[in-house]
Amino acid sequence: MIDITRREFIKAAGAAGLVGAFGGWLPAARARTSAQVVVVGGGFGGAAAARYLKLLDPEISVSLIERDRQYVTCPMSNDYIGGNRAFDTLVHDFRALEELGIAVHHDSVVNVDAERRRVVTQTGAEHPYDRLILAPGIDFRWDALEGYDAAAAQVMPHAWKAGPQTQLLRRQLQEMRDGGLFVMVAPDNPFRCPPGPYERASLVANYLATYNRRGKVLILDPKDSFTKQELFMQGWDELYPRGMIEWVPGSQGGTVERIEVNTRTIVTAAGAQQADVANVIPPQQAGMLAHTLGLTDETGFCPVDQRTFESTRVAGIHVIGDSCIAGEMPKSGVSANTQAKVCAHAVLDILAEHEPTLPSLMNACFSLVGPTYGISVAAVYELTDKGITAVEGAGGVSPMDATPAQRRLESVFWRSWYENIVADTFG
């Protein structure tokens, strides 16, 4: 049993860098000097895995394959959409990883020959590996919402992959007519960042309260509850005019039946809503590469050995981050980062022909209800015979009776957490 109070956990998360608190302290097993590890995906999981492999064993050959030359983070993108930060604060490159000796290739993977252990890219290059770590993130189930597809996202953005979609949604919010309606379609479980839609709704409301006081946010949700619900609703009551944010659960007509893109109309069993701005976040699945390689099961995500994150479908391939099934861990940046560290240790142990150690993992999800109003949920996880499970009594959620000063401090922790996880991941 890990004995850690919620106050100590959150203090470590915000001020000292949660991402380094666990996972990076174990002594590394020395891999074979000639060993080659290829990592695919340069987000909070993939980039961290590449970085920690090289930090733990500088002699190992590590290659990172990432299509884009810069990575735009989803964490803090809601703060940008709400007008509270510049876009360039979300953008990070891979120069520090290259300086560590990691070979960074900006290319797309088209196939993996698991028998020959070769990664084949769009440019025709072949990258041999002894172990392959995949962090392909999420993709959308475009067939899940009638009338909504990739083309529709250019009119009704999802903004759930940061970049141009994030900028489009912010621009639409800024251009929304006075007294207009912002409609969010929340996704069903499981999806990337469980508190993310509700943080976004909060910061959109903050923007409206400042620049468009007659505007309204309507959340249509197939679920009947969501993470930190009481804390979000308490914050909405405290910060925003009554009725500015309305949440409609599935049992009361929140489930979408179809979307009419030309008129920005969302149809539910309870009726039709025409939006001035529509943020449609579709149901999600593992990144398409995982499907192409046969790593997914009927859930659309990747079953793994939760001790090492090695695929149970294809030997020699490890899957971390949003694409994997990791027991009780949610799909979040911290989850991906800590899984990356556990996976890096496991890979080095396997290459050294040692028994992988039992993992210790964590997650923390901070949310802004307003620019200076923060809430959080945190947990520590261990591997049991039931898989990765939360350690009873470790972590917790923000108290309902917190003072304004405490809420303000959690917003500081949120921003501190972001700077720390970026530094821990990208160097």
Image (spheres, grey):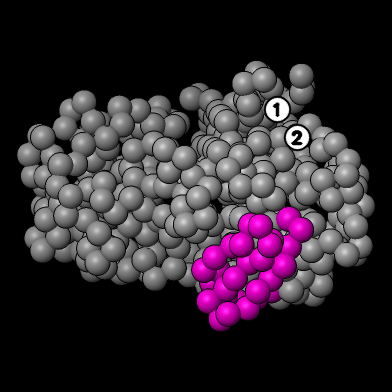
Can you say which quadrant of the picture contains the N terminus?
Answer: top right
The secondary structure type at the circle numbered 1 is strand
Position of 355 relative to 3 (above/below): below
Q: How far apart in space, not on screen, are marks 2 and 1 (Cα)?
A: 6 Å
User: In the visual, does 174 lie left or right of 83?
Assistant: left
First in sequence: mark 2 vs mark 1:
2
> Residue 83 at what x, y percent from top left?
40, 63
Position of 262 relative to 186 (above/below): below
Identify which residue is drawn at 54% across, 65% down. 111
Mark 1 lies on residue: 382
Identify which residue is drawn at 37% across, 59% down. 159
| Crowd tier of the residue under label 1, counting other residues whose Cα lies within 10 Å: few below 14, some 14–19, many 20 or above | many
Identify which residue is drawn at 77% across, 23% down. 2
The secondary structure type at the circle numbered 2 is loop
| Crowd tier of the residue under label 2, counting other residues whose Cα lies within 10 Å: few below 14, some 14–19, many 20 or above | many
> Residue 312 at what x, y percent from top left?
61, 39
Contact? badges 2 and 1 (CB < 8 Å): yes
> Residue 122 at what x, y percent from top left?
53, 76
- For the image, the number of numbered tags is 2
> Residue 114 at what x, y percent from top left?
63, 57
Position of 92 relative to 227 (above/below): below
Mark 2 lies on residue: 359
Identify which residue is drawn at 42% across, 47% down. 285
* Magenta-drawn segment: 104-131
Give the amino acid at mark 1.
Glu
Q: Is residue 124 magenta?
A: yes
Residue 150 sits in which quadrant?
bottom left
Give the amino acid at mark 2.
Pro
Q: Residue furthest bottom?
A: 123
